[in-house]
Image (cartoon, helix red, strand yellow):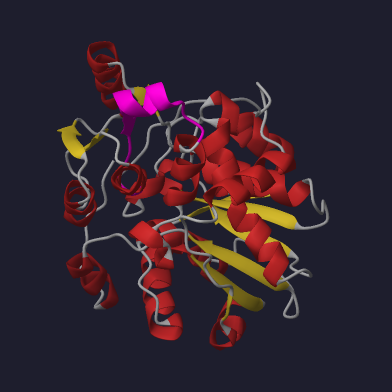
Amino acid sequence: MLEKNSVTLQDVKDAAERIRPYIRRTPLLREATLDKLLGCQVYFKPEMLQITGAFKLRGALSKILTLSPEELARGIVTSSSGNHAQACAYAGQLLGIKVTVIVPDNTPHLKVSNARRMGANVILWERTYAKRWEKVRQEVAEHGYTIVHAFEDYTVMAGQGTIALEIMEDLPDVETVVVPIGGGGLISGISTAIKESNPKIRVVGVEPANSDGFLASRNAGHRIRIQSKPTIADGITCSEPSERPYEIVERYVDEIVAVEENDIREAVRQIAREAHLVAEPTSSVVVGAMLAKKIKVRPDEKVAFVLTSGNWDIENIGKIFKDEPVPGVL
């Protein structure tokens, strides 16, 4: 049973056992071709190779597999920028349960079509977080669904933290782990697993500069709301951190940095060119931070970069690769 007000290393280990039969254990790839450019020994954790193309399946299954038979029979509902929606859709298909997902009306087509293909009831709604969650609550009131939140649920966080266990197993002497921050559930799980295993490992979070609610809140000393601007890193916009992830991030994440749009675009190109991986901009912020020299590292430092996902319209990835304009979203 998860503690009421926290997620722990043991919770992450329990989640790993729970989800192991259903997920893909992604490799930790040594990418020496990028060492000189990024200034360290580069390792990629490529979660775009995960089933559904993103890390989100870990957290979704961690939560859904703990639901009672009655809850499963009623079905689940969530809101998502796209990748969590696909994860819930896959879990629903796997377990034979009804899934409803509320996604922004400008979500990349690939994410919407994938969720629908896996049987989810996809409802396109206003992009703002508050409006989408109003719709979620309406669905709960009408149908009795159980909410599977993408980042505020400790059981979901525990599932995401299994990434850290795999990194530490594959590279016991890892020194720094760099993680994108959106809602904060991923870095909450990862930082908890790391700091409660080996506090000496540095954890760095990266946000797009156009929507860096966690960094702004850290600088202010408390949670604040900012005015976000459009970003191509559409999966990790954050105008204001929610309470649960914020507390864990402040406890365990050593540094938070923000990356400009041009650096994110260049990171997409470098990951494709040198690592032969299709990383959506949301994933690529971690490499963008290194290109922009936002994180201090040594040439011999072993740094693991969590590449969270690859679910983006391939036409837009191609435009970035060719340095053609791709608009950001709020």
Q: Is residue 199 left or right of residue 294?
A: right
Image position of 26 with respect to 181: above or below: below
Say if residue 33 shows up in the picture. yes
Q: Is residue 201 left or right of residue 249?
A: right
* Residue 251 x/y as whole percent: 73, 36
Which corner quadrant holds the N terminus? top right
Q: Quadrant of residue 134?
A: top left
* Residue 125 x/y as whole percent: 18, 31
Q: Give me the residue at 48% from left, 63% from top.
A: 24
Q: Is residue 51 left or right of residue 144?
A: right
Q: In this rendered view, identify the residue nearer to me: 39 or 122.
A: 122
Q: In this rendered view, identify the residue nearer to me: 215 or 16.
A: 16
Q: Is residue 24 left or right of residue 122?
A: right
Q: Quadrant of residue 179?
A: bottom right
Q: Which residue, as the protein is rendered here, is positioned at the far front?
A: 69
- Find the magenta span and give its range: 66-83
* Residue 90 x/y as whole percent: 32, 49
Residue 251 located within the stretch drawn in magenta: no
Q: Quadrant of residue 217?
A: top right
Image position of 273 with respect to 183: above or below: below
Image position of 22 with respect to 73: above or below: below
Q: Give me the residue at 70% from left, 48% from top.
A: 193
